[in-house]
Image: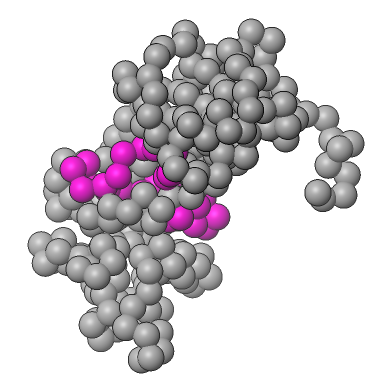
Amino acid sequence: MSAGKEDRPKRALRGRAGRMKGGRGSGRASTGQVRLWGRHAVEAALKNPDRNHHKLWATREGIDSLDGELPANFPVEYAQAADLARLVARDAPHQGLVLECAPLDDIFLGDILEGDPTRPLLILDQVTDPHNVGAILRSAAAFNACAIVTQDRHAPPESGVVAKSASGALEVVPWIRVVNLARALEEIAEAGYWRIGLAGEAKSSLAEALPAGPVALVLGAEGEGMRQNIAGHCDALARLPISEAMESLNVSNAAAIALYAVATR
């Protein structure tokens, strides 16, 4: 625990509580609800005024760990850690907190493109591992990216696994889902962004390819990389200067390095 934490006043947890609806399972509950677990993911969701919450299952220690006070009428059910384990994915580190809430509202690409052009944009081509998407969201928050963009059919749903890996970033980084990724890249170019696709076989390094203006970074799935059509919608392809001893990096690591390069250009 950092020095002075106990002396700081607790902020109100502002999330909107809704009527409890049924549903069991792990990750994504029935009736369209999402189950989040772990202190950082749950705390961030509770502080997000755009979330509608339905119920919080928690141990007393889990409630005490939250940085904030729940509203007096918030629906909480106290439970033992073993009981919480039955509400989430097997071996999920729930840390005494499981929150059932509604998914976040859809966000449109056009709204993001009207924002701050100095913030980078991340486009993920068929990155389907929820741990990777969550880690990329976390890096996007750390390096002030304006959003991530994925194709709706080839990306994981909003879930507890994504939220836990994102460590709170799911609540602060807009996640835009589009039907056609190539068409979205055309819209991004029309907004003035220079589209750089990361590819290990590219001749130019990322540092050489980075422009001074708005940047959209495009990353493909680990192994397959970007699809040919998506690479064809990039203004440039660039590689990260990794050692020949390694063929490639995990896509979430590559995203973090690329975002750092943009932040320090």
Which residue shows up at 55% across the image and 55% down it? 142
188 sits to left or right of 33: left
Residue found 61% across the figure and 13% down from its top: 74
In percent of width and height, residue 7 lies at 89, 36
What segment carries the magenta color? 135-162
Residue 17, percent from left and from top: 53, 14
Front one among 243 and 95: 95
| In this rendering, position of residue 67 left or right of residue 56 | right
Quarter assignment of residue 176: top left
Q: Position of residue 35 (x, y in %)?
A: 44, 30
Whether residue 101 can be seen here: yes
Question: Residue 68: in sight, yes or no?
Answer: no
Residue at the spot 36% in from the left edge and 41% down from the top edge: 175
In front here: 223 or 144? 223
Question: Outermost residue toward the left?
Answer: 229
Image coordinates of residue 25 in percent, x first then y, are 38, 29
The answer to if 145 sits in the magenta stretch is yes
